[in-house]
Amino acid sequence: MFKKLGLKYRTRRASKKRADQIDYLSKSSKKVGVVTSNEIYKSSDFKVFIKSLTSKGMDTDILVFNDTNQSPESQNIQCSKQDYNWSGKIKSPVVNNFIKTPFDFLFSVNTSSILHIENILALSKAKCRIGATTQEENKYLDFIIKVKENSSIDKLTTSMLHYTEIQY
């Protein structure tokens, strides 16, 4: 209980501190981060999204939030509930390094709300955080794509690529 309350508090506090904005003068984006859940990571639509980013010459880092106790199947950065202490602070140095990376874009590829991923988005030093929301307001994203709850990942990733195309 304290862990969830602490996590919510840290997430709200981090979103209020955010002051940096995307640099519109840069003509191309080089570093891209992607945050997603383990279920979405396994989907073929997600793999197509990652291939399209890497084919455009993007240096892509992927953080996968694993909510289950299954062993990780990916070679990417893994995050789970065990990476948080009792007050909601992130213990993992690998996840903290991901958060401190100044990505040009940080994509949140999720169609449902996950508190741990929202915390990572709020703390991130990315210049522009892009994701989907089913709520009316999401303070943790700079660019919001409105989708229906549990809609297709393909529609979400296609929209993300479409709206960020001017930066490539």
Image: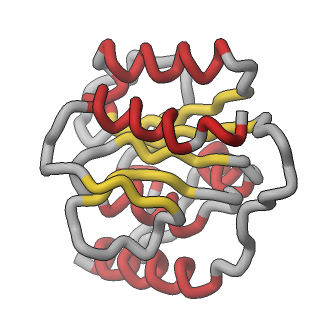
Q: Residue at x 71, y 41 (%)?
A: 167
The quadrant holding residue 146 is: bottom left
Q: Relative to residue 102, is residue 49 drawn left or right?
A: left
Decide which of 75, 31 is in the foreground and name it: 31
Residue 108: x %, y % from top left: 44, 47
Residue 27: x %, y % from top left: 84, 43
Quadrant of the snapshot with the N terminus: bottom left
The quadrant holding residue 2 is: bottom left
Q: Residue at x 55, y 56 (%)?
A: 129
Decide which of 7, 71 is in the foreground and name it: 7
Q: Relative to residue 111, is residue 167 drawn left or right?
A: right
Q: Is residue 60 above or below residue 95?
A: above
Q: Residue at x 45, y 65 (%)?
A: 119
Quadrant of the snapshot with the C terminus: top right
Q: Is residue 127 above or below residue 7?
A: above
Residue 10: x %, y % from top left: 48, 79
